[in-house]
Amino acid sequence: MPTPSPLRPHCAAVDRLCSWLPSQPGRNTTPAASTQDLERIMEVMSAAWTLGTQETYGAGLLVYHVYCDLSGVTEAE
């Protein structure tokens, strides 16, 4: 299990892509999106992949975060 964080609520693997949040949203170089744009992005993301793909990617996120926790990588990093 990863270290508890409000950014990573306990949920099924299939829900992690849309439920888990980055520690620093907007860290990339793209312009800020409106709330409506972000909602649309999440809607499209949730429909873009099959359930099996969402489960696999979500499981990968869990493994990555557990690895980071065990290796002392901070949320910000």
Image: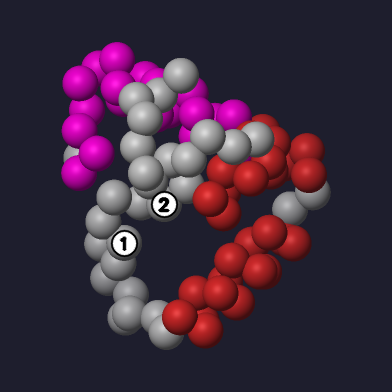
Q: Are marks 2 and 1 in contact (CB under 8 Å)?
A: yes
The residue pinned by badge 1 equals 25
Q: Is residue 19 left or right of residue 69?
A: right
- The circle drawn on residue 21 is 2
Residue sticking out furthest to the top: 70
In the rendered image, residue 11, in percent from the top left (x then y), is placed at: 59, 37
The main secondary structure of the magenta stretch is helix
- Quadrant where the C terminus sits is top left
Return the x and y of residue 46 as percentages of the image width and height: 68, 59
Q: Secondary structure at mark 1?
A: loop
Q: Which residue is pictured at 35% across the width and 37% down the height?
A: 5
Which span is picked out in magenta? 57-76
In the image, residue 32 sits, relative to residue 57, either above or below, namely below
- Up-down: is 28 above or below 7? below
What amino acid is at disc 2?
Answer: Leu
**Neighbours of disc 2 within 10 Å: few (<14), some (14-19), many (20+):** few
Camera-nearest residue between 6 and 46: 6
